[in-house]
């Protein structure tokens, strides 16, 4: 989130209008413009591709350390959406919004390491 970290929506608009505008454009285009996935949020915020890499690598680590076990991971919608995207081809019709309190079940194949969204 960069400079917007920890701010309420309305405070972000007031305190950092230029950064907020960039973030808002980033959110609007993230589904339609592939180049926007590399756009970092000003002030140290990560791009969607960086978020994807961080989330996927960490969940792969958890899967390796807990083979054959059930694990519960709690996160926010953006991280969960990136994990969903990891299970599907880049151009699939994966959900664009993950609602708060939603339940998403991923299974990681012990043989291939392939992720399956159930």
Image (cartoon, rainbow, N blue to C red):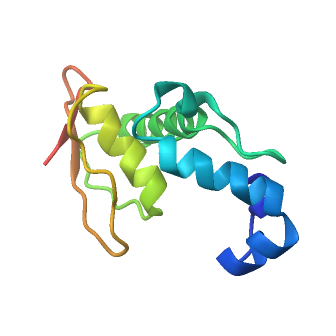
In-front residue for pair 27/110? 27
Establish if 105 lies above or below 74: above
Establish if 73 lies above or below 50: below
Image-based side of 82 in relation to 102, left or right: right
Image-based side of 92 in relation to 98, left or right: left
Residue 66 visible? The answer is no
Q: Residue at x 27, y 27 (%)?
A: 91
Q: Position of residue 38 (x, y in %)?
A: 60, 28
Residue 73 placement: quadrant: bottom left
Q: Residue at x 55, y 38 (%)?
A: 48
View extreme (top): residue: 112
Residue 77 placement: quadrant: bottom left
Residue 82 visible? The answer is yes
Q: Position of residue 94 (x, y in %)?
A: 24, 43
Q: Position of residue 115 (x, y in %)?
A: 24, 33
Q: Residue at x 82, y 75 (%)?
A: 14
Image-based side of 31 in relation to 7, left or right: left
Q: Residue at x 84, y 48 (%)?
A: 43
Residue 26 placement: quadrant: top right
Say which quadrant the N terminus sits in.
Answer: bottom right
Image-based side of 77 in relation to 92, left or right: right
Q: Position of residue 117 (x, y in %)?
A: 19, 44
Picture mark count = 0
Establish if 50 lies above or below 102: above
In-front residue for pair 31/71? 31
């Amino acid at each position: 989130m960069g400079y917007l970290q920890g701010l309420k929506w309305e405070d972000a608009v007031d305190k950092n209008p230029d950064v907020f505008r960039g973030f808002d454009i980033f959110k609007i285009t993230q589904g339609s413009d592939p180049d926007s996935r590399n756009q970092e949020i000003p002030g140290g915020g990560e791009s969607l591709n960086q978020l994807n890499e961080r989330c996927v690598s960490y969940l792969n680590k958890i899967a390796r350390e807990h083979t054959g076990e059930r694990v519960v991971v709690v996160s926010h919608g953006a991280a969960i959406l990136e994990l969903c995207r990891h299970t599907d081809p880049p151009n699939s019709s994966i959900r664009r919004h993950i609602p708060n309190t939603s339940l998403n079940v991923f299974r990681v194949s012990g043989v291939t390491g392939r992720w399956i969204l159930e």
